[in-house]
Every structure is written in structure tokens, then in C-alpha cells.
Image (spheres, rainbow, N blue to C red):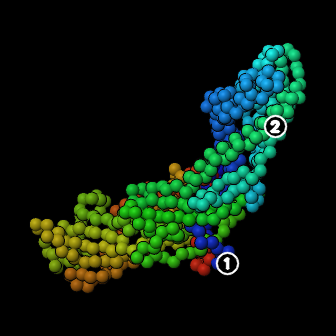
Amino acid sequence: EAMGALGTALLCALLTPALARTTDAVLRLNKGVLSDALGQGGLLGDGGLLGTAGILGGPGGLLGNGGLLGDGGLLSVLGEGGLLSTVQGLTGLRIVDLTLPRVSLRLLPGIGVHLNLYTRVALNAKCLLGLLDIAVEVNVTARVRLTMDGTGHPKLVTERCDTLLGGIKIRLLRGLLPIVDNLLASVLNRLLPNLLCPVVDVALGLVNDKLDLVNSLVPLGLLGSIQYTVSSLPLVTGQFLEVDLNTVVGRAAGSLVDHPLGKPEAVPTAPQVPMPPLPAMADTASSQLGLSVNFLSAVLSVLQKEGALDLAISTGMFPELPPLTTSTLGALVPAVFKTYPKPCELLLRIAVPEAPVVTLKKNKGVIRLTARAEVVVIHSEDIQSSLCLLNIDTSLLAQFSVQDNKLKISVSLEKADLSLVSSSVGDFDVSLLETLVGRIFDVAFLPTMNSVLGAGVPLPRLLNTDFTNADINVIEVSARAGHRGSLPAPP
């Protein structure tokens, strides 16, 4: 189950109900993913929030010209008319360079993150003797707790922040005369810590904006929407961050099909199946996503309720099918030929009156779908009459894949059982129609259903995770314990 950038596996485990959770999805991120997302090359590294063009650097950055800590900002207390100008005639103090911050972090089990930020700041100023170049090494350490705010969003909050200044070097006349000015060093030691720790808070605020994305509303094609919501305080271990998610699946008309945050619909829904914990994540996996049977069933329920699985077929719509006429049907069922000796066009209406039921078995997913097929005779002048009504109980094999961070489902027919509901030509042996119905499913109904399912189910995003091309496993669970789908981490 090695996963790279991101991975996925639909999992189920034989666990006792006591260990199960009433959640729809579980997202687990390896500490390496968090480090990549927040550290060097990530949100707090070069090109990110703390990069030279981020919130610390650049013309409009906190340390840039005109910024909070730049020329004209809070550091002006050291400049002309400020503290140092009255002490020793120092004017025009400004930051001229910021070394790319070196960022490291580690997970603190049960708490959050320990963040360390090291950088060097170069300033210059004027004094009575000439130009001053000042270089300061800055090491910021912060203990950050992962919490949830009042709206249920995960949030990083600084619990403690310490700043250590070292290697303060002051040169007069651009290096001609080294000096060590204890007074200036003392002032910088007092002021810079109080100015740099708020920078960490600003950075974490922007990271929190990224964390909020997991609660965003995403469209389910044109038929509805899905919202993943954090259901409880995320779990932090020394190896990974684990987030329990509930899902709200909405129909295009706006009503909620399922799930914890919405009122249940009048149409009965399948009993909620508890979701057991995710299995151990491989050392090579960067992330893991578990999806419950409840969630997958809710998605199919949206499609069923919106009529996306219904299909009307007439002659010529699918060239691979024989002509849909009473002659074709009469060749299989003598009673039809007897009633309609002259050929008439037929219209086949296939509807799915109930939400499909998803089960996960070892190495495969199974969808139980009941279709109702009405055969309608089209007489002259567009007069129609029902010839027969069939129930088709099917077992569909489901295959899963991930593309564009969407779970794709494709189905094939495992078996179908036909039964006659009503007939205007009298009772007849429905087994005579099995071959034709199987052909209709293979050529028309299942390709249409796969086209709908092929739009994909958007997967949750946390810190820009992407499960595209993830490995997928399907594992059977006991009905007592619950079913779960899990997507391993991307490579």
C-alpha cells in the first residue's frame, strides 16, 4: 500500500462495535506531509508565507519597506526621532535583507506542532560617524496547539513563543571599523522578540485558512454537493495527524440526503454502519483516507433521487441493440406476437425506484440495484400503452480509482434476476427475456450509469493533499462492526 503524493484504499475491518466510530471519513496525514506542507518549500518556506516574497519579505511584507517591521513601521522607534536617535543619534534604521528562513517542525502527540524558525536579518542606519550595517541572527521557537474553533474548524493557536537573538554584528562605514555596541544590542534584544512572535501568529492565521478548506462545499457534478466537516478534535501522534470527518450530501434542489448535519428525509435510509479505525499506515505512505459505506451509499442515493440513473430507450438510440419492436419481442415471447401481429415500435423506460445499497467485500465492492423496466407500445398517432412491467434485481461489481482527486466508480453486471410485475398480454416466462435484458444492460444501461459515476466524487482536501492515482484496497467488514473505505496516501 505504498502511496506517494497521496493514496486511497477502501477498507473494512472485523472489529468490535466498541472500537467503531460514527464518522463518514477519516483522513490521516503522515508527519512528512505536514513538514512538506508547512516547512521548506511549503507554506512557511521559500515561496510561501515566510519566503522573500511572502509576508516577511517583499515590498509589502511585514519586514519589507513600509511593512510592520520595515522602514516606516514599528522599527521606526529605533530611527530618526525614536529611541536610538535620542540615545546616540541613530537615524533611518531599516531592514535591507532577509535570509531565507530555515523552518523545521515536529509533531507533539496530543498537542500539535513544535515549530522552529531560523533566519538572519540585515539592517542599516545612519549615525553621527556614518553608515551602520547591522546583522542579527534570529531563532524563533513556537509551541502550537491544534484546536477547534466555535464553528468546528481546526485551528492552530500559538501557546508559547520564544525568540533568541544571536550574533548581533554592527559595522561602521560598511565594514571599515567593527564595533560592538552593547546599548544597540540591548535594544534589539528587547524589541525584536516582541515583534517577531506576532509574525508567527500571522503565518499560522494563513495556515488556518488552508485548514478551513477541508470544510468547503464541493459540487457533485450538476446533481448535488458534498461538504466534509470536521466531527471532532483531530488526533495528533508522533507520526501523523488524523481527522474524523462527517459528510453532508446535498441534492441539487437543496435538501440533504443524509447525514449528521441535516434533517433526514421522509424516504427511509439504510441504517448507519459504524466505521472502525483505519489500519496501520505503511511507513512509505504519505497519507491515508478511509471512506465509509454510509458515505458511498449517500452519494448513490443522490444520483437515484435526482433520476440520474433512469433511462428511456427507443429504436436506434443504441445501434448495438436489435430494433425495439413488438416483432423482436414477439420472437421471444409468443404471447406478444399473438397480441401484436403487426410490428409496432416499443419504448423501454428503465427507472431505479430505490437507492442502491453498497456493500464492501474482500477485494471488491458490490452495489445492489433494483431497476423497474416498463415496455411501452407506441401505436399510431402517438398513442401509448403498457405492454409489461419487469423488476430487475441486479448485483453490480464496483471498481474504484482516483483521478483529479475524485473517487471514480465503474460498475459491471455480476448477475440479474427478473420478475414479472404486470403484463397486458398475460403471464409469460420472463426467463425468455434474460438474454435481451442482459444485452440492454451491457450496451445501454450500465454505460449510462458509468458515465454518471465517472464524473467522480470529490475527495476532501487538507493542506492541498491530492489522492490522484492512489492505491485502493477493499476489505470486508462484519455487519456488526461496520464497513469502511480507505484511500492510502499518495506516493
Q: Amino acid at mark 2?
A: Arg
Gap in angstroms between the C-alphas marked 2 and 1: 54 Å
Residue at figure coordinates x 54%, y 52% from the top left: 405
Q: Give residue 291's quadrant in the image.
A: bottom right
Q: Nearer the viewer, mark 2 or mark 1?
A: 2
- Relative side of 140 to 6, left or right: right
Residue at figure coordinates x 82%, y 25% from the top left: 87
- The residue nearer to you, when weighing 490 against 63, is 63
- Relative side of 97 to 206, left or right: right
Q: Could you say where residue 28 lies in the image, as x and y percent from the top left?
A: 66, 59
Residue 64 appears in the rendering: no
Q: Residues within 10 Å of mark 2 (few under 14, many from 20)?
A: few
What residue would you read off at disc 1?
Answer: 18
Residue at figure coordinates x 78%, y 29% from the top left: 83
- Vertical position of residue 132 compared to residue 320: above or below: above
* Residue that extends furthest to the left in the rendered view of this protein: 381
Q: Could you say where residue 337 lies in the image, as x and y percent from the top left?
A: 18, 76
- Relative side of 336 to 108, left or right: left
- Vertical position of residue 446 compared to residue 131: above or below: below
| Residue 315 numbered tag | none
What residue would you read off at disc 2?
Answer: 190
- The residue nearer to you, when weighing 340 against 256, is 256
- Relative side of 19 to 362, left or right: right
- Vertical position of residue 281 compared to residue 301: above or below: above
- The residue nearer to you, when weighing 193 against 248, is 193
Residue 67 appears in the rendering: yes
Q: Amino acid at mark 1?
A: Ala
Q: Could you say where residue 431 lies in the image, as x and y percent from the top left?
A: 34, 79
Residue at figure coordinates x 22%, y 76% from the top left: 387
> Judging from the image, what secondary structure is the residue with disc 1 in?
helix
